Amino acid sequence: MIYCVEDDAGIRELVVYTLQNTGLEARGFADGEALFAALREQKPDLLLLDIMLPGEDGISILRRLRAVRETAKLPVILLTAKNTEYDKVIGLDSGADDYVAKPFGMMELVARIRAVLRRTQDNPPGEGGGRPLVAGSICVDERAHSVHVGADEVQLTLKEYQLLCLLMKNQGAVLTRDVLLENIWGYGNESETRTVDVHIRTLRQKLGAGGALIETVRGVGYRMGETR
């Protein structure tokens, strides 16, 4: 099930119609109040969220979702007419998994949705590897879909979690931004490398002292540093 929060009825109905005709279940909502009412009944597989909404805006809604355990890892793609780097960074910093600027092509939107869903469904909670991933004070249990730094559990978005797992599974190897885009977001585009940088920065912040293990290598890419 895909939820779409969009105050423009024409866009909302077109998105829902397109998704339903490509084999995806979808429901549309005009504002955050309607969304949260629906979330109490059913949690979707992914949320399409417009930034410019009447009442509570999309960024505020996103932050509320990320602050609650039940929706902290809910995949969210922002839909907005704003297309400046500043607005994009604010959205990603707030926990968005992807960002699609209006006007967008419906098939591009469907492709982005399928890429996120594929990664979510390929790595559902409880079906990870048997051994936890460990680097210094960071421990990732893929079976429980949990991340700890020392004794403290850290709440990550889906993309932050996938990014951390990829780095930890390739400790010592330099992963370029293009490689990270391709493996985590499902597409490679030089203009989107800022997306990787923003997610790395928020990941470091959330990991605290453990975040220092994620090193920038000659400006080319990132690696999980060796522990001593």
Image (tube, helix red, strand yellow):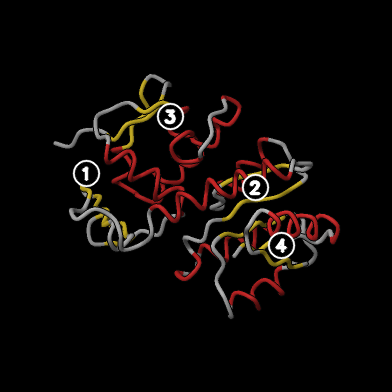
Could you tell me which secondary element the residue under label 3 belongs to? Answer: helix
Residue drawn 33% across and 45% down? Answer: 165
Give the class, few, some or many, for how many residues have Cα within 10 Å of label 4's Cα (few <14, many ≥20): many
Q: Nearer the viewer, mark 2 or mark 4?
A: 2
Could you tell me which secondary element the residue under label 4 belongs to? Answer: strand
Give the class, few, some or many, for how many residues have Cα within 10 Å of label 1's Cα (few <14, many ≥20): many
The tag earlier along the polypeptide, 2 or 1, is 2
Q: Mark 4 points at which residue?
A: 5
Give the x, y percent position of residue 2. 62, 62
Q: In which quarter of the image is the N terminus?
A: bottom right
Q: Name the residue under label 1.
A: 135
Q: Mark 3 and mark 2: span between their CA atoms?
A: 22 Å
Q: In the depicted view, which residue is nearer to us: 91 or 142?
A: 142
The tag earlier along the polypeptide, 4 or 1, is 4
Q: In which quarter of the image is residue 172?
A: top left
The tag earlier along the polypeptide, 4 or 3, is 4
Q: Which amino acid type is marked by label 1? A: Ala
Q: How many labels does the image show?
A: 4
Q: Is 86 situated left or right of 68 in this image?
A: right
